[in-house]
């Protein structure tokens, strides 16, 4: 990813630049402090944790430093530590016209140690070269007559791992936080979308049942027709059930000593006349009538009971 | 200040918006399903009620069943007049047992009873019965 972008070598004597696209930058030793130490730790994060103590007394106490740590080789315990002041780097870049946002990745010259087979000219009077496996910036005049700076700086110097200045400055969330949040939101988005899709396509069960009913009873597919039929049968059902219930209640009033004299029933009302053998039986009939919530009345002088109701 | 400086925030914001969009989609689907579902449920209930009522009150063999009713009693006791889907009947001189039988049969048929007059004369009953279906 880093190799795709242009790589610019940053040094104090550089001229101002104007860019319209983002670039990678490589810093000369002027911008960082290097230390190599053999430490018996396995992982870079462990080495990074002890980095501040290694640079104690070497760095400006008023500045805030960040650290880059890597292991020289897998077999040795030797670690390379680089301490850099992000704010100062940013300030320098700004003074050269390089906006902070235009810097994709920051690399350090030490990271490309293997490529410094000879000296590289930096500005008009300085050179970058490797001495004892450390990249240093020296005055050009220190080179001997036959030692010409032949190395040309190019994109091929881009190391694999770099530092993102943007992640250390003006960010409300760190890279790891943003990745976690993004993944979390994406996960929920996926769940919600799946649920939504399932809901949108699962409402079919009732619909299918309804379609099957429509197919089987095509005359009932119109709600208007259904309502009409329903009204007709509901009123018929209600009225006829009431007639039958009332007759059933009247039947239960016919017992020993009670005779049905007459019954008149039509669509609107009904009236039954019972003849009772004595007042005791008549009272029982009236009690039953009361229990069923029916109207009753006596015929004066005899033990006949009239029970009536409307429909 | 450039938006590129806030790439991470934009990434989180984008994911958040996507999540909110998906949530809105889910809620819309839920509401829509609930509306469609309740409409379908109501229609199904209505159809089932119509079918249930029809099953009770529409009997294709009703005419035959009514004819049987006529034959329960001796011919001399029955006056029977059928016109279309209406019956006008008169039963005379019924014993209490015969009255009970005929009334039970009548009320077990899916018919609309428009008139039922029972009148006791001495020890027998005369019944005037009108129905339609």
Image (cartoon, rainbow, N blue to C red):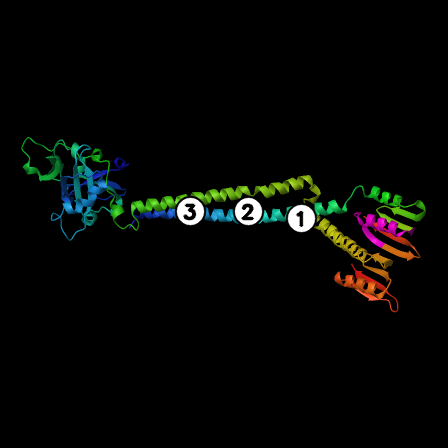
Earlier-in-chain disc, 3 versus 2: 3
Chain letter for mark 1, please: B
Front residue (pair B23, A127)? B23
B7 in the magenta segment: no
Q: The magenta stretch spans which residues?
A: B92-115
Residue A138 in the image: above or below residue B17: above
**Residue at mark 2:** B33
Q: Residue at x 64, y 46 (%)?
A: B44
Which of pointers 1 and 3 indicates the residue nearer the eye? 1
Which of pointers 2 and 1 indicates the residue nearer the eye? 1
Q: Furthest residue to the right?
A: B76
**Residue at mark 1:** B46
| Mark 2 neighbour density, 10 Å: few (under 14) some (14–19) many (20 or more) | some
- Same subunit, tags 2 and 1: yes
Answer left or right for A23 relative to B66.
left
Chain letter for mark 3, please: B
């Amino acid at each position: 990813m880093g190799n795709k972008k242009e790589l610019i070598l940053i040094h104090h004597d550089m001229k101002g630049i104007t860019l319209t696209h983002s670039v990678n930058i490589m810093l000369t030793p002027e911008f960082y402090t290097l230390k190599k130490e053999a430490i018996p730790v396995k992982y870079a994060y462990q080495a990074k944790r002890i980095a501040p103590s290694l640079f104690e007394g070497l760095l400006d106490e008023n500045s805030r430093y960040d650290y880059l740590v890597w292991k020289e080789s897998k077999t040795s315990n030797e670690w390379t530590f680089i301490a850099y002041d992000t704010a100062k780097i940013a300030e320098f870049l700004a003074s050269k016209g390089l906006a902070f946002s235009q810097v994709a990745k920051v690399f350090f010259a030490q990271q490309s140690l293997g490529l410094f087979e000879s000296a590289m000219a930096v500005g008009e009077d300085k050179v970058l070269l490797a001495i004892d496996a450390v990249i240093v910036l020296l005055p050009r005049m220190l080179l001997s007559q036959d030692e010409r700076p032949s190395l040309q700086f190019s994109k091929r110097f881009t190391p694999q791992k770099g530092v993102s200045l943007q992640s250390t400055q003006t960010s409300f969330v760190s890279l790891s936080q943003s990745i976690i949040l993004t993944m979390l939101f994406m996960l929920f988005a996926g769940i919600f979308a799946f649920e939504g899709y399932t809901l949108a396509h699962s409402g079919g069960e009732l619909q299918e049942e309804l379609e099957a009913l429509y197919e089987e009873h095509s005359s009932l597919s119109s709600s208007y027709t259904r309502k009409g039929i329903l009204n007709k049968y509901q009123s018929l059902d209600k009225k006829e059930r009431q007639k039958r219930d009332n007759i059933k209640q009247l039947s239960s009033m016919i017992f020993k000593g009670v005779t049905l004299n007459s019954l008149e029933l039509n669509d609107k009302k009904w009236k039954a006349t019972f003849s009772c053998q004595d007042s005791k039986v008549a009272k029982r009939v009236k009690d039953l009538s009361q229990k069923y919530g029916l109207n009753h009345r006596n015929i004066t002088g005899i033990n006949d009971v009239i029970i009536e109701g409307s429909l | 200040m450039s938006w590129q400086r806030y790439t991470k925030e934009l990434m989180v914001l984008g994911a958040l918006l996507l999540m909110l969009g998906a949530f809105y989609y889910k809620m819309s689907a839920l509401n829509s399903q609930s509306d469609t579902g309740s409409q379908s449920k109501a229609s199904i209930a209505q159809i089932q009620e119509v079918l249930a009522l029809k099953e009770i009150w529409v009997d294709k063999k009703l005419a035959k069943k009514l004819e049987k009713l006529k034959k329960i009693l001796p011919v001399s006791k029955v006056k029977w007049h059928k016109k279309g889907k209406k019956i006008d009947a008169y039963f005379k001189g019924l014993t209490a047992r015969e009255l009970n039988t005929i009334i039970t049969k009548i009320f077990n048929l899916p018919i609309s009873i428009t008139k039922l007059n029972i009148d006791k004369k001495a020890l027998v009953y005369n019944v005037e019965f009108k129905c339609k279906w």
